[in-house]
Amino acid sequence: MQFKVIDSKMKEIYFNPTKVEDKVETVEFNNTFWNTMNVMAYQNIAIQQVKFA
């Protein structure tokens, strides 16, 4: 049990812990997202190098 003070009144907060499981779709999306970000970063670095060459 946790307590949180709101407007000088004591409130009780109850929660049931649950196990968080990664779904296959979420993992695939994360991989795709970070792969895309890496590609964009490499392209940006290449463009910067061309500008300063």
Image: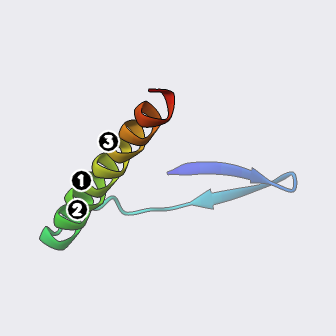
Label 1 Cα neighbours within 10 Å, binned few <14 / some 14-19 / many ≥20: few
Q: Looking at the picture, which amino acid does disc 2 mark?
A: Thr
Q: Looking at the picture, which amino acid does disc 3 mark?
A: Tyr
Q: Tell me whether circle 3 and circle 2 mark residues in contact (CB < 8 Å).
A: no
Q: Position of residue 16 (x, y in %)?
A: 37, 63
The answer to which of 49 and 44 lies nearer the viewer is 49
Label 2 Cα neighbours within 10 Å, binned few <14 / some 14-19 / many ≥20: few
- Residue identifier under label 1: 35
In this rendering, the label closer to the viewer, 3 or 2? 3
Q: Outermost residue, bottom direction?
A: 25
Q: Residue at x 33, y 58 (%)?
A: 17
- Residue identifier under label 2: 32
In this rendering, the label closer to the viewer, 1 or 3? 3
- In this picture, residue 45 sits left or right of residue 31: right
Question: Rounded to the nearest whole Å, what is the CA distance between mark 1 and mark 3?
Answer: 11 Å
- Residue identifier under label 3: 42
Q: Position of residue 50 (x, y in %)?
A: 42, 35
Q: Considering only vertical position in the picture, is 51 above or below 23? A: above
